[in-house]
Image: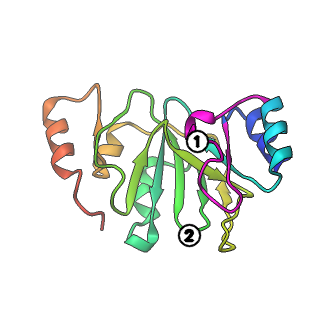
Amino acid sequence: MSAWAHRYIRDGFEVVCLRPGSMCPQSARGVHSATRSHDVVTKLWSETPTANIGLRVPVGHVLLQVDTTQGGSVWHLKKLGATMSSKTAANTWEFLYKAPGLRLCPGNKEGSIRMQGRNAILVAEPSTLKSGGRYQWFDLRRPVAPPLSYFAELGLAVDLPECGPALKDHLHADAGSPMA
């Protein structure tokens, strides 16, 4: 696991040491324990070699989580473009997009498609859950940057700095609508 964590740091990610077989951070500091230090990673994974690996969502990015068990469909995201994505141990999907300037509003952690920002952790391959489920990369492309208005079209609660009041009213009115 340590070798993977070092690789993620070389790829520019901040790494979070997660409890073995879990999505929960090892440290009480949670996402704020993320590091880009190879020395810290070596120490953490020498103490707990089977610890899972989490990646902090980078600045200017969002993590979209599609829960297919709740009726979510990855086809809703097709318009956003192919991007870095993974299949989680619980058979849901996670997609990382560049979204500089996008501000999240309350209401994005419920439903079949959820969006989270900088305080979220993407559990990374080769992490596993105690149930035996594995995390695996589906697509390792660099995250793409779709037009910010596409996130609003998905019915997600966002605040677009460049949009006018009409679009903001529309997007907040539809933020709680279920995704078919």
Residue denoted by label 1: 28
The residue under the point 67% across, 35% down is: 13
Classify residue 35 by image quadrant: top right
The residue under the point 56% across, 69% down is: 90
Residue denoted by label 2: 91
Q: Is the residue marked by circle 1 packed among few (<14), some (14-19), or many (20+) residues within 10 Å? A: few
Q: Position of residue 75 (x, y in %)?
A: 44, 63
Q: Position of residue 131 (x, y in %)?
A: 65, 74
Q: Position of residue 128 (x, y in %)?
A: 70, 64
Residue numbers of the magenta segment: 15-37
**Which element carries disc 2, helix, strand or loop?**
loop
Q: Is the residue marked by circle 2 packed among few (<14), some (14-19), or many (20+) residues within 10 Å? A: some
Classify residue 171 by image quadrant: top left
* Figure quadrant of the C terminus: bottom left
Looking at the image, residue 138 sits to the left or right of residue 178; the answer is right
In reply to whether residue 35 is colored magenta, the answer given is yes
Q: What mark, if any, has residue 39 been given in the picture?
A: none
Q: Earlier in the sequence, mark 2 or mark 1?
A: 1
- Between 123 and 155, the one nearer to me in the picture: 123
Q: How is the image coloured?
A: rainbow
What type is the residue that disc 2 sits on?
A: Asn
Q: Position of residue 164 (x, y in %)?
A: 18, 29
Q: Nearer the viewer, mark 2 or mark 1?
A: 1
Q: Give how far apart the Cα atoms at labels 2 and 1 are.
A: 27 Å
- Between 86 and 37, the one nearer to me in the picture: 37
Looking at the image, residue 150 sits to the left or right of residue 133; the answer is left
- In the displayed image of the protein, which residue is found farthest to the front? 28
The residue under the point 45% across, 70% down is: 68
Q: How many marks?
A: 2
Dominant secondary-structure state across the stretch colored magenta: loop
**Which element carries disc 1, helix, strand or loop?**
loop
Residue 57 appears in the picture as rendered: no
